[in-house]
Image (cartoon, rainbow, N blue to C red):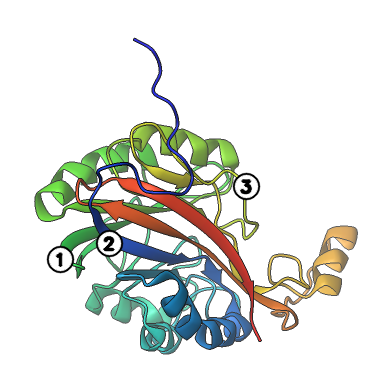
Amino acid sequence: MPELPDRAAAGPAAGSLVGVKLLFIGDVVGSPGRRGLASLMPGLRERFEPGLVVVNGENSAGGMGVTAKTAEEIFAMGADVITLGNHTYRHREVYGYLDETERIVRPANYRHANPGHGSVVVEAEGMRVAVLNLSGTVGLTAARSPFDEADLRLDGLAKKSDATVVDFHAEVTSEKVALGWYLDGRVAAVLGTHTHVPTADGRVLPGGTAFISDVGMTGSRRSVLGVRTEQAIERMRTDMPVRFETATEDVWVMGATVTINRSGLADSIEPFMLPAP
């Protein structure tokens, strides 16, 4: 059987019925990232007209971790769901909030007894959309393989939702690409986070899953992944402990939009990078 051609990175397929437009925001880094996102969110809503907004907030508190305060600030900007990652448990005071708040999700392949939820189902534009958070295991620590965890979760989520979006918080590109292909045709999108550098591989895979290795970060571009450049360079040059501070200049908001159709798959993906005023 001949291989199916890749769908275009943008442009709905002929005859498809648009279900919901997803606006996905890459890792928000500290207060500069939060301020930048707040300043651009009205314009993002006007430009993309999303029915669902998902924000990765795992660096929103001082550049590492999340607190109830920073999460509520992001929700107040218009986020419907906040996803997390390897800094989920950086601040102990957030543990109870993670248990109590369904719309903030941490990697599902962490230990089940750990605080928080690994997925959530929300209503958007007449569709039930599941948001599943997974962590990579190459260079990061998780209790179970993201491949196995996806298999365990997807059947149950399919009974409660019309489409599933995956935030894959992972270190290496190969693991991200592999999971994208593994889930192709089974989820609407696999969107990579964690490495803070946007990649140029955004596309809709043959089975209808929108994929990108990393959507980038929302924070200072005059930095090393959100950290002040001189501090990151000193740490790498000397191998000595250095206190990192969040960089504040030249803040950009990075992410992607995905058009999800009524079949629960994707018609298009559009990465974006926009400077904050």
Residue at x-position 22% and y-position 59%:
129
Residue 240 falls left or right of residue 126: right
Position above or below: 51 against 10: below
Which amino acid, mark 3? Ala
Q: Earlier in the sequence, mark 3 or mark 2?
A: 2
Which amino acid, mark 2? Val
Quarter of the image with the C terminus is: bottom right
Residue 26 place in picture, x, y as percent: 52, 65
Give how far apart the Cα atoms at labels 3 and 2 are: 24 Å
Dot 3 crowding, Cα within 10 Å, few <14, some 14–19, many 20+: few
Q: Tag 1, which secondary structure?
A: loop
Residue 49 visible somewhere in the drawing: yes
Position above or below: 129 against 213: below
Q: Earlier in the sequence, mark 1 or mark 2?
A: 2
The residue furthest right is 237
Q: Please report contact status of discs 1 and 2: CB closer than 8 Å, yes or no.
A: yes
Q: Earlier in the sequence, mark 3 or mark 1?
A: 1
Residue 13 place in picture, x, y as percent: 34, 42
Q: Which residue is mark 3?
A: 200
Q: Tag 3, which secondary structure?
A: loop
Q: Which residue is mark 2?
A: 20
Residue 122 place in picture, x, y as percent: 20, 67
Residue at x-position 30% and y-position 36%:
185
Which amino acid, mark 1? Gly
100 or 213, which lies in front?
213
Residue at x-position 22% and y-position 44%:
154
Residue 37 falls left or right of residue 15: right
Residue 147 place in picture, x, y as percent: 36, 37
Give how far apart the Cα atoms at labels 3 and 1 are: 32 Å
- Which disc number belongs to residue 126? 1
Q: Tag 2, which secondary structure?
A: strand
